[in-house]
Image (cartoon, rainbow, N blue to C red):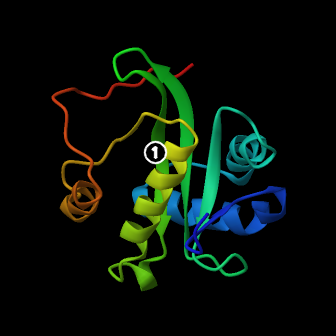
Amino acid sequence: MTQILHLATTEDLDRLDRMVAGYHAFEGIESDTDRRRAALEPLLEGSPHGAIWLIGPKMAPVGYVAISFGWSIELGGLDGVLDEFWIREAVRGRGMGGEALLALQKTLKAAGIVALSLEVARSNETAARLYQRAGFQPRDYQFMTWRA
């Protein structure tokens, strides 16, 4: 693992929850503490369904990236979805996001992940450029969601 990424554990729950709350506020996502923590805790406890990495110094992270795992026949096996990726506004544009993505791709490839997908708002051109520099390519599909 690189110095830019640190696998988050249950010890990181409080600081991670604050960052997720910041991301959700930035994106206008409705969330509350109980719901966030219920979603974060299994991943921090080692759930096989996903993982979260802190970005930057372990004791003073500047962001996080959350990946959920699945299986794709089309893509040839174990795949991931980049569920959330956030860097504090004060340090955006300094290359840490790109460095974190490249380190994450190496880590996931070594773990047997064959593909990583994400969604990005069409209006978020800055993020789209970052993802394209990291090798992500748009596909001619519409991402759709059903919620229980």
Q: Nearer the viewer, residue 67 or 134?
A: 134
Amino acid type at circle 1 is Leu
Q: Nearer the viewer, residue 124 or 76?
A: 76
Name the secondary structure under disc 1: strand
Query: In the rendering, at what x and y percent does residue 81 appear?
Result: 46, 38
Graded by Cα atoms within 10 Å as few (under 14), some (14 to 19) or many (20 or more), the crowding at tag 1 reads: some
Quadrant of the snapshot with the C terminus: top right
Rendered residue at 77%/64% (across/down): 12
Above/below status of 74 relative to 82 = above
Query: In the rendering, at what x and y percent does residue 79 appear?
Result: 47, 31
Above/below status of 30 relative to 1 = above
Rendered residue at 46%/66% (across/down): 100
**Which residue is the site of mark 1?**
82
Above/below status of 60 relative to 73 = below
> Would residue 84 be found to the left or right of residue 61 on screen?
left
Rendered residue at 32%/80% (across/down): 93
Query: In the rendering, at what x and y percent does residue 128 appear?
Result: 23, 56
Rendered residue at 26%/52% (across/down): 135
Q: Nearer the viewer, residue 122 or 35?
A: 122
Query: In the rendering, at what x and y percent does residue 60 appear?
Result: 67, 81
Query: Residue extending furthest front?
Result: 110
> Would residue 81 be found to the left or right of residue 56 on screen?
left
Quadrant of the snapshot with the N terminus: bottom right
